[in-house]
Image (cartoon, rainbow, N blue to C red):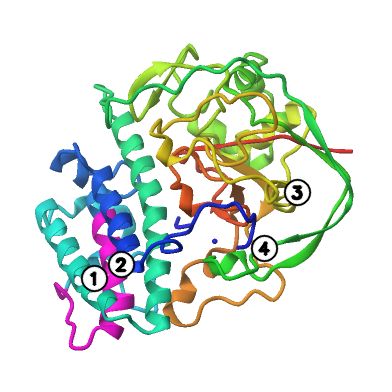
Protein backbone atom coordinates (compact mmCIF):
# COMPACT_ATOMS: atom_id res chain seq x y z
CA UNK A 1 0.00 0.00 0.00
CA UNK A 2 0.98 3.63 -0.47
CA UNK A 3 -0.58 5.35 1.48
CA UNK A 4 -2.38 14.46 3.54
CA UNK A 5 -4.65 20.04 6.00
CA UNK A 6 -5.02 22.57 8.21
CA UNK A 7 -4.94 20.56 11.39
CA UNK A 8 -3.15 22.57 13.98
CA UNK A 9 -1.42 25.90 13.61
CA UNK A 10 1.56 24.27 15.30
CA UNK A 11 2.07 21.37 12.92
CA UNK A 12 5.57 20.87 11.47
CA UNK A 13 6.39 22.29 8.09
CA UNK A 14 5.49 20.06 5.19
CA UNK A 15 8.20 19.45 2.58
CA UNK A 16 9.13 22.76 0.99
CA UNK A 17 7.14 24.98 3.36
CA UNK A 18 10.00 26.91 5.01
CA UNK A 19 12.81 26.39 2.53
CA UNK A 20 13.11 26.33 -1.23
CA UNK A 21 11.60 23.42 -3.09
CA UNK A 22 15.04 22.55 -4.45
CA UNK A 23 16.48 22.37 -0.92
CA UNK A 24 13.59 20.26 0.28
CA UNK A 25 13.91 17.96 -2.70
CA UNK A 26 17.60 17.39 -1.96
CA UNK A 27 16.91 16.74 1.73
CA UNK A 28 14.07 14.26 1.22
CA UNK A 29 15.84 12.36 -1.55
CA UNK A 30 19.06 12.32 0.46
CA UNK A 31 17.31 10.85 3.49
CA UNK A 32 16.00 7.91 1.47
CA UNK A 33 19.52 7.06 0.36
CA UNK A 34 20.81 7.58 3.91
CA UNK A 35 18.31 5.06 5.25
CA UNK A 36 20.01 2.46 3.02
CA UNK A 37 23.46 3.24 4.42
CA UNK A 38 25.05 0.07 5.75
CA UNK A 39 22.88 -2.28 3.74
CA UNK A 40 24.73 -4.76 1.56
CA UNK A 41 23.63 -5.18 -2.06
CA UNK A 42 22.26 -8.59 -1.07
CA UNK A 43 20.05 -6.93 1.57
CA UNK A 44 18.61 -4.55 -1.01
CA UNK A 45 17.57 -7.06 -3.65
CA UNK A 46 15.45 -9.54 -1.66
CA UNK A 47 11.68 -9.46 -1.20
CA UNK A 48 10.47 -11.18 1.98
CA UNK A 49 6.77 -11.41 1.04
CA UNK A 50 4.41 -10.11 -1.68
CA UNK A 51 3.33 -7.12 0.45
CA UNK A 52 6.92 -5.93 0.84
CA UNK A 53 9.39 -4.64 -1.74
CA UNK A 54 13.19 -4.79 -1.97
CA UNK A 55 15.03 -1.67 -0.85
CA UNK A 56 16.47 -1.36 -4.37
CA UNK A 57 12.95 -1.26 -5.80
CA UNK A 58 11.93 1.56 -3.43
CA UNK A 59 14.95 3.59 -4.56
CA UNK A 60 14.10 3.04 -8.21
CA UNK A 61 10.31 3.44 -8.00
CA UNK A 62 10.48 6.82 -6.26
CA UNK A 63 12.90 7.98 -8.97
CA UNK A 64 10.59 6.71 -11.71
CA UNK A 65 7.72 8.67 -10.10
CA UNK A 66 9.63 11.95 -10.54
CA UNK A 67 10.85 10.97 -13.98
CA UNK A 68 7.44 10.03 -15.35
CA UNK A 69 5.17 12.56 -13.64
CA UNK A 70 7.52 15.59 -13.60
CA UNK A 71 10.48 15.31 -15.95
CA UNK A 72 8.74 13.81 -18.98
CA UNK A 73 5.91 16.38 -19.14
CA UNK A 74 7.79 19.44 -17.88
CA UNK A 75 11.48 19.07 -18.87
CA UNK A 76 11.74 19.97 -22.53
CA UNK A 77 13.38 17.24 -24.59
CA UNK A 78 13.72 14.83 -21.66
CA UNK A 79 13.93 11.14 -22.50
CA UNK A 80 13.62 8.33 -19.95
CA UNK A 81 16.89 7.08 -18.49
CA UNK A 82 16.13 3.51 -19.58
CA UNK A 83 13.25 2.38 -21.82
CA UNK A 84 12.41 -0.62 -19.59
CA UNK A 85 12.36 1.19 -16.24
CA UNK A 86 8.77 2.31 -16.68
CA UNK A 87 7.73 -1.35 -16.80
CA UNK A 88 10.04 -2.47 -13.97
CA UNK A 89 9.32 0.34 -11.50
CA UNK A 90 5.71 1.40 -12.08
CA UNK A 91 3.74 0.35 -9.02
CA UNK A 92 0.02 0.40 -9.84
CA UNK A 93 -0.62 3.15 -12.38
CA UNK A 94 -2.45 1.06 -14.96
CA UNK A 95 -3.37 4.10 -17.02
CA UNK A 96 0.38 4.63 -17.55
CA UNK A 97 1.05 1.08 -18.76
CA UNK A 98 1.69 -2.48 -17.70
CA UNK A 99 4.12 -3.30 -14.91
CA UNK A 100 6.29 -6.10 -13.54
CA UNK A 101 4.24 -8.25 -11.11
CA UNK A 102 4.50 -6.99 -7.54
CA UNK A 103 5.18 -10.42 -5.95
CA UNK A 104 8.15 -10.89 -8.30
CA UNK A 105 10.03 -7.67 -7.53
CA UNK A 106 12.61 -9.68 -5.60
CA UNK A 107 13.55 -11.52 -8.81
CA UNK A 108 14.91 -8.34 -10.39
CA UNK A 109 18.61 -8.90 -9.84
CA UNK A 110 19.23 -6.36 -12.60
CA UNK A 111 19.50 -3.44 -12.69
CA UNK A 112 22.09 -3.67 -9.94
CA UNK A 113 22.08 -1.47 -6.84
CA UNK A 114 24.86 0.61 -8.41
CA UNK A 115 22.80 1.10 -11.56
CA UNK A 116 19.73 2.10 -9.54
CA UNK A 117 21.81 4.65 -7.60
CA UNK A 118 23.09 6.02 -10.92
CA UNK A 119 19.46 6.33 -12.02
CA UNK A 120 18.63 8.30 -8.86
CA UNK A 121 21.57 10.65 -9.44
CA UNK A 122 20.46 11.23 -13.02
CA UNK A 123 16.87 12.02 -12.03
CA UNK A 124 18.05 14.27 -9.20
CA UNK A 125 20.33 16.27 -11.49
CA UNK A 126 17.56 16.76 -14.04
CA UNK A 127 15.02 17.72 -11.36
CA UNK A 128 17.35 20.22 -9.75
CA UNK A 129 17.90 21.91 -13.12
CA UNK A 130 14.14 22.09 -13.58
CA UNK A 131 13.64 23.57 -10.11
CA UNK A 132 16.34 26.18 -10.66
CA UNK A 133 14.26 27.50 -13.58
CA UNK A 134 11.21 28.06 -11.35
CA UNK A 135 8.82 25.57 -12.92
CA UNK A 136 5.14 26.22 -13.50
CA UNK A 137 2.90 25.87 -10.43
CA UNK A 138 1.52 22.57 -11.68
CA UNK A 139 5.02 21.12 -12.00
CA UNK A 140 5.97 22.39 -8.53
CA UNK A 141 2.80 20.83 -7.12
CA UNK A 142 3.76 17.51 -8.65
CA UNK A 143 7.23 17.75 -7.10
CA UNK A 144 5.64 18.34 -3.69
CA UNK A 145 3.36 15.35 -4.22
CA UNK A 146 6.39 13.29 -5.21
CA UNK A 147 8.25 14.30 -2.05
CA UNK A 148 5.34 13.24 0.13
CA UNK A 149 5.15 10.02 -1.88
CA UNK A 150 8.87 9.49 -1.22
CA UNK A 151 8.34 10.00 2.52
CA UNK A 152 5.77 7.23 2.45
CA UNK A 153 8.36 5.01 0.84
CA UNK A 154 10.90 5.93 3.50
CA UNK A 155 8.58 4.37 6.05
CA UNK A 156 7.83 1.39 3.82
CA UNK A 157 11.55 0.92 3.21
CA UNK A 158 12.20 0.55 6.94
CA UNK A 159 9.25 -1.74 7.62
CA UNK A 160 10.21 -3.92 4.67
CA UNK A 161 13.84 -4.15 5.82
CA UNK A 162 12.65 -5.12 9.29
CA UNK A 163 10.42 -7.86 7.92
CA UNK A 164 13.25 -9.14 5.71
CA UNK A 165 15.81 -9.27 8.51
CA UNK A 166 13.32 -11.00 10.82
CA UNK A 167 13.29 -13.95 8.40
CA UNK A 168 17.04 -14.46 8.91
CA UNK A 169 18.00 -16.84 11.76
CA UNK A 170 20.94 -14.52 12.46
CA UNK A 171 18.44 -11.72 13.24
CA UNK A 172 20.73 -8.99 11.93
CA UNK A 173 20.29 -5.40 12.99
CA UNK A 174 19.63 -2.72 10.39
CA UNK A 175 21.79 -0.47 12.57
CA UNK A 176 23.14 -0.38 16.08
CA UNK A 177 20.45 1.68 17.76
CA UNK A 178 20.18 2.99 21.30
CA UNK A 179 16.98 1.71 22.90
CA UNK A 180 14.38 4.34 23.76
CA UNK A 181 14.59 5.58 27.35
CA UNK A 182 12.50 3.61 29.80
CA UNK A 183 9.29 5.25 30.92
CA UNK A 184 7.28 4.41 34.05
CA UNK A 185 4.02 2.54 33.77
CA UNK A 186 1.08 4.89 33.34
CA UNK A 187 -2.49 4.06 34.25
CA UNK A 188 -4.87 4.11 31.32
CA UNK A 189 -7.41 6.91 31.74
CA UNK A 190 -10.36 7.85 29.56
CA UNK A 191 -10.79 11.38 28.26
CA UNK A 192 -14.43 12.51 27.98
CA UNK A 193 -15.62 13.88 24.65
CA UNK A 194 -19.04 15.44 24.06
CA UNK A 195 -21.53 14.57 21.36
CA UNK A 196 -21.86 16.93 18.44
CA UNK A 197 -20.81 17.89 14.95
CA UNK A 198 -17.06 17.99 14.30
CA UNK A 199 -15.18 19.21 11.24
CA UNK A 200 -12.62 16.82 9.78
CA UNK A 201 -10.51 16.73 6.66
CA UNK A 202 -8.12 19.11 4.97
CA UNK A 203 -8.73 22.82 4.67
CA UNK A 204 -6.16 25.49 3.96
CA UNK A 205 -3.10 26.07 1.83
CA UNK A 206 -0.79 23.32 3.11
CA UNK A 207 -0.20 20.08 1.26
CA UNK A 208 -2.70 17.26 1.62
CA UNK A 209 -3.35 14.06 -0.28
CA UNK A 210 -6.65 13.99 -2.13
CA UNK A 211 -8.10 11.35 0.23
CA UNK A 212 -8.04 13.91 3.07
CA UNK A 213 -10.48 16.14 1.22
CA UNK A 214 -12.89 17.80 1.29
CA UNK A 215 -13.26 19.13 4.81
CA UNK A 216 -16.72 18.30 6.05
CA UNK A 217 -18.79 17.79 9.18
CA UNK A 218 -19.41 14.48 10.89
CA UNK A 219 -21.52 13.69 13.93
CA UNK A 220 -19.89 11.90 16.86
CA UNK A 221 -21.75 10.59 19.86
CA UNK A 222 -20.59 11.19 23.41
CA UNK A 223 -17.54 9.02 23.96
CA UNK A 224 -14.22 8.70 25.74
CA UNK A 225 -10.73 8.17 24.32
CA UNK A 226 -7.91 6.38 26.11
CA UNK A 227 -5.12 8.67 27.29
CA UNK A 228 -2.44 6.42 25.80
CA UNK A 229 -2.11 3.54 23.35
CA UNK A 230 -2.42 -0.05 24.54
CA UNK A 231 0.97 -1.17 25.86
CA UNK A 232 2.93 -4.38 25.48
CA UNK A 233 2.11 -5.20 29.09
CA UNK A 234 -1.60 -4.67 28.48
CA UNK A 235 -1.51 -6.91 25.43
CA UNK A 236 0.45 -9.62 27.22
CA UNK A 237 -2.44 -9.91 29.69
CA UNK A 238 -4.81 -10.40 26.75
CA UNK A 239 -2.64 -13.28 25.54
CA UNK A 240 -2.29 -14.84 29.00
CA UNK A 241 -6.08 -14.78 29.32
CA UNK A 242 -6.26 -17.24 26.41
CA UNK A 243 -7.79 -14.74 24.02
CA UNK A 244 -6.19 -16.23 20.91
CA UNK A 245 -8.17 -19.39 21.72
CA UNK A 246 -11.51 -17.69 22.36
CA UNK A 247 -13.57 -17.37 19.16
CA UNK A 248 -16.20 -15.14 20.77
CA UNK A 249 -13.71 -12.26 20.86
CA UNK A 250 -12.96 -12.32 17.17
CA UNK A 251 -14.59 -11.19 13.97
CA UNK A 252 -15.27 -14.21 11.77
CA UNK A 253 -12.59 -13.25 9.26
CA UNK A 254 -10.20 -12.56 12.11
CA UNK A 255 -10.77 -15.94 13.70
CA UNK A 256 -10.26 -17.63 10.34
CA UNK A 257 -7.05 -15.64 9.83
CA UNK A 258 -5.44 -16.47 13.17
CA UNK A 259 -6.34 -20.14 12.73
CA UNK A 260 -4.92 -20.26 9.21
CA UNK A 261 -1.76 -18.33 10.08
CA UNK A 262 -1.23 -19.84 13.52
CA UNK A 263 -0.95 -16.45 15.20
CA UNK A 264 -0.48 -16.56 18.98
CA UNK A 265 1.03 -13.10 19.65
CA UNK A 266 2.12 -9.93 17.83
CA UNK A 267 4.53 -10.16 14.94
CA UNK A 268 8.19 -10.22 16.07
CA UNK A 269 7.46 -11.25 19.69
CA UNK A 270 9.34 -14.24 21.11
CA UNK A 271 7.28 -17.26 22.09
CA UNK A 272 7.85 -16.59 25.81
CA UNK A 273 6.83 -12.92 25.34
CA UNK A 274 10.05 -11.58 26.85
CA UNK A 275 11.69 -10.13 23.75
CA UNK A 276 10.90 -8.75 20.31
CA UNK A 277 12.80 -8.26 17.08
CA UNK A 278 13.49 -4.62 16.21
CA UNK A 279 15.41 -2.66 13.59
CA UNK A 280 18.21 -2.67 16.17
CA UNK A 281 18.11 -6.45 16.58
CA UNK A 282 16.41 -8.52 19.27
CA UNK A 283 15.65 -6.69 22.50
CA UNK A 284 13.93 -7.23 25.79
CA UNK A 285 10.23 -6.42 25.51
CA UNK A 286 9.39 -3.09 27.17
CA UNK A 287 6.08 -3.64 28.95
CA UNK A 288 5.30 0.10 28.98
CA UNK A 289 5.89 0.81 25.29
CA UNK A 290 2.94 0.75 22.88
CA UNK A 291 2.25 -2.67 21.41
CA UNK A 292 2.87 -2.75 17.67
CA UNK A 293 2.69 -4.96 14.58
CA UNK A 294 -0.93 -5.89 15.19
CA UNK A 295 -3.52 -6.60 12.53
CA UNK A 296 -6.89 -4.88 12.64
CA UNK A 297 -8.37 -8.20 13.73
CA UNK A 298 -6.08 -8.34 16.77
CA UNK A 299 -6.74 -4.70 17.66
CA UNK A 300 -10.50 -5.25 17.41
CA UNK A 301 -10.38 -8.44 19.49
CA UNK A 302 -8.32 -6.73 22.20
CA UNK A 303 -10.76 -3.83 22.38
CA UNK A 304 -13.67 -6.23 22.77
CA UNK A 305 -11.82 -8.17 25.49
CA UNK A 306 -11.11 -4.88 27.32
CA UNK A 307 -14.79 -3.88 27.26
CA UNK A 308 -14.09 -1.07 24.84
CA UNK A 309 -13.92 -0.46 21.09
CA UNK A 310 -11.72 1.19 18.50
CA UNK A 311 -12.32 4.91 17.88
CA UNK A 312 -13.73 6.18 14.62
CA UNK A 313 -11.44 8.36 12.55
CA UNK A 314 -13.71 11.36 13.22
CA UNK A 315 -13.36 10.81 16.99
CA UNK A 316 -9.59 10.46 16.67
CA UNK A 317 -9.07 13.48 14.41
CA UNK A 318 -11.35 15.84 16.30
CA UNK A 319 -9.24 15.30 19.41
CA UNK A 320 -5.79 15.13 17.82
CA UNK A 321 -6.31 18.30 15.75
CA UNK A 322 -5.92 20.35 18.93
CA UNK A 323 -2.55 18.81 19.84
CA UNK A 324 0.96 19.69 18.79
CA UNK A 325 2.32 17.34 16.14
CA UNK A 326 5.33 15.76 17.79
CA UNK A 327 6.54 12.71 19.61
CA UNK A 328 8.51 9.62 18.78
CA UNK A 329 8.75 10.02 15.01
CA UNK A 330 11.54 9.11 12.61
CA UNK A 331 13.72 12.05 13.65
CA UNK A 332 13.83 10.75 17.24
CA UNK A 333 16.26 8.14 16.00
CA UNK A 334 14.83 5.25 18.04
CA UNK A 335 13.00 3.60 15.13
CA UNK A 336 10.87 1.74 17.66
CA UNK A 337 7.90 2.60 19.91
CA UNK A 338 8.67 3.93 23.37
CA UNK A 339 6.84 4.62 26.58
CA UNK A 340 5.86 8.24 27.25
CA UNK A 341 5.57 10.61 30.16
CA UNK A 342 2.37 11.44 32.00
CA UNK A 343 -0.65 13.05 30.38
CA UNK A 344 -2.62 12.45 27.17
CA UNK A 345 0.11 11.39 24.80
CA UNK A 346 1.33 9.55 21.76
CA UNK A 347 -1.42 10.55 19.38
CA UNK A 348 1.45 11.21 16.98
CA UNK A 349 4.35 8.85 16.46
CA UNK A 350 5.18 5.51 18.05
CA UNK A 351 2.47 3.44 16.34
CA UNK A 352 -0.19 3.91 13.69
CA UNK A 353 -3.51 3.50 15.48
CA UNK A 354 -6.19 1.33 13.92
CA UNK A 355 -9.61 2.96 13.80
CA UNK A 356 -13.03 1.39 13.32
CA UNK A 357 -13.54 3.39 10.11
CA UNK A 358 -13.47 1.82 6.67
CA UNK A 359 -11.27 3.55 4.14
CA UNK A 360 -13.84 5.20 1.94
CA UNK A 361 -14.41 8.50 0.18
CA UNK A 362 -15.39 11.61 2.08
CA UNK A 363 -18.59 13.31 0.88
CA UNK A 364 -17.99 15.03 -2.50
CA UNK A 365 -14.50 13.52 -2.79
CA UNK A 366 -12.77 14.15 -6.11
CA UNK A 367 -9.53 12.32 -6.97
CA UNK A 368 -6.67 14.04 -8.72
CA UNK A 369 -7.00 14.36 -12.47
CA UNK A 370 -5.29 11.94 -14.83
CA UNK A 371 -3.09 9.03 -13.84
CA UNK A 372 -2.35 10.58 -10.45
CA UNK A 373 -5.99 9.95 -9.60
CA UNK A 374 -5.00 6.30 -9.19
CA UNK A 375 -2.87 7.26 -6.17
CA UNK A 376 -5.51 6.87 -3.46
CA UNK A 377 -9.09 6.71 -4.63
CA UNK A 378 -9.10 3.30 -6.28
CA UNK A 379 -8.08 1.64 -2.99
CA UNK A 380 -11.21 2.77 -1.15
CA UNK A 381 -12.60 -0.72 -0.54
CA UNK A 382 -11.97 -3.45 2.02
CA UNK A 383 -9.33 -1.51 3.97
CA UNK A 384 -9.37 0.24 7.36
CA UNK A 385 -8.03 3.66 8.33
CA UNK A 386 -5.09 4.17 10.68
CA UNK A 387 -4.13 7.51 12.20
CA UNK A 388 -1.23 9.31 13.83
CA UNK A 389 2.02 8.10 12.27
CA UNK A 390 4.69 5.88 13.77
CA UNK A 391 8.26 5.83 15.01
CA UNK A 392 9.43 5.63 11.38
CA UNK A 393 7.19 8.39 9.97
CA UNK A 394 8.99 11.66 9.09
CA UNK A 395 7.70 14.46 11.32
CA UNK A 396 6.95 16.79 8.41
CA UNK A 397 4.80 14.11 6.80
CA UNK A 398 2.16 13.61 9.50
CA UNK A 399 -0.84 15.71 10.52
CA UNK A 400 -4.20 15.20 12.18
CA UNK A 401 -6.03 14.71 8.88
CA UNK A 402 -3.63 12.11 7.45
CA UNK A 403 -5.42 8.89 6.50
CA UNK A 404 -3.28 5.77 6.28
CA UNK A 405 -4.95 2.55 5.19
CA UNK A 406 -4.22 -1.15 5.22
CA UNK A 407 -6.03 -4.42 4.82
CA UNK A 408 -7.25 -5.88 8.14
CA UNK A 409 -4.89 -8.88 8.07
CA UNK A 410 -1.71 -6.82 7.50
CA UNK A 411 0.58 -6.27 10.45
CA UNK A 412 4.16 -5.74 9.29
CA UNK A 413 3.70 -1.98 9.64
CA UNK A 414 4.11 -0.28 13.05
CA UNK A 415 0.40 -0.59 13.83
CA UNK A 416 -1.16 -0.55 17.30
CA UNK A 417 -4.32 0.74 18.92
CA UNK A 418 -5.97 3.20 21.28
CA UNK A 419 -9.23 2.35 23.01
CA UNK A 420 -12.50 4.24 22.99
CA UNK A 421 -15.84 3.78 24.77
CA UNK A 422 -19.34 5.09 24.33
CA UNK A 423 -20.24 7.53 27.08
Q: Are marks 1 and 2 in contact (CB under 8 Å)?
A: yes
Task: Give the residue at x 73% y 24%.
Answer: 188
Q: Nearer the viewer, mark 3 or mark 1?
A: 1
Q: Are marks 3 and 4 in contact (CB under 8 Å)?
A: no
Q: Which residue has dot 1 on it?
A: 128
Indicate the secondary structure of the residue bearing disc 3. helix
* Mark 1 vs mark 4, CA separation in Å: 33 Å
Q: Nearer the viewer, mark 3 or mark 2?
A: 2
The quarter of the rendered structure image containing the C terminus is top right
Return the residue nearer the eye: 108 or 248: 108
- Classify 161 as above or below 3: above
Indicate the secondary structure of the residue bearing disc 4. loop
Task: Give the residue at x 77% y 26%.
Answer: 189
Return the residue nearer the eye: 219 or 107: 219
Q: Which residues are magenta?
A: 58-83
Disc ID at residue 231 = none
* Mark 1 vs mark 2, CA separation in Å: 6 Å
N-term mark: 3 or 1: 1
N-term mark: 1 or 2: 2
* Mark 3 vs mark 1, CA separation in Å: 42 Å
Q: Nearer the viewer, mark 1 or mark 4?
A: 1
Q: Which residue has dot 2 on it?
A: 22
* Mark 4 vs mark 2, CA separation in Å: 28 Å
Disc ID at residue 201 = 4
Q: Is residue 96 magenta?
A: no
Return the residue nearer the eye: 295 or 137: 137
Task: Judge whether residue 97 can be spotted in this image.
Answer: no
Disc ID at residue 315 = 3
N-term mark: 3 or 2: 2
Amino acid sequence: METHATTSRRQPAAPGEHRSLAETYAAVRGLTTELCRGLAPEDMAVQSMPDASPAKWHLAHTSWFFEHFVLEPYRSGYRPFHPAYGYLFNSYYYSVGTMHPRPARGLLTRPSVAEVLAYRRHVDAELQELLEKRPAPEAAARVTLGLNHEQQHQELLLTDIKHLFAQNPLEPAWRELAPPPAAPARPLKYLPRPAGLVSIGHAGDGFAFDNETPRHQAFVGAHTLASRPVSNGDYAEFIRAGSYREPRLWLADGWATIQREGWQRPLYWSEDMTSEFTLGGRRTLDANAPVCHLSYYEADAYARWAGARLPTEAEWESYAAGLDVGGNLLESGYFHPAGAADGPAQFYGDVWEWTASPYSAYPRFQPLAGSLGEYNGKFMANQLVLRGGSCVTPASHIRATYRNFFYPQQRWQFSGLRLAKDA
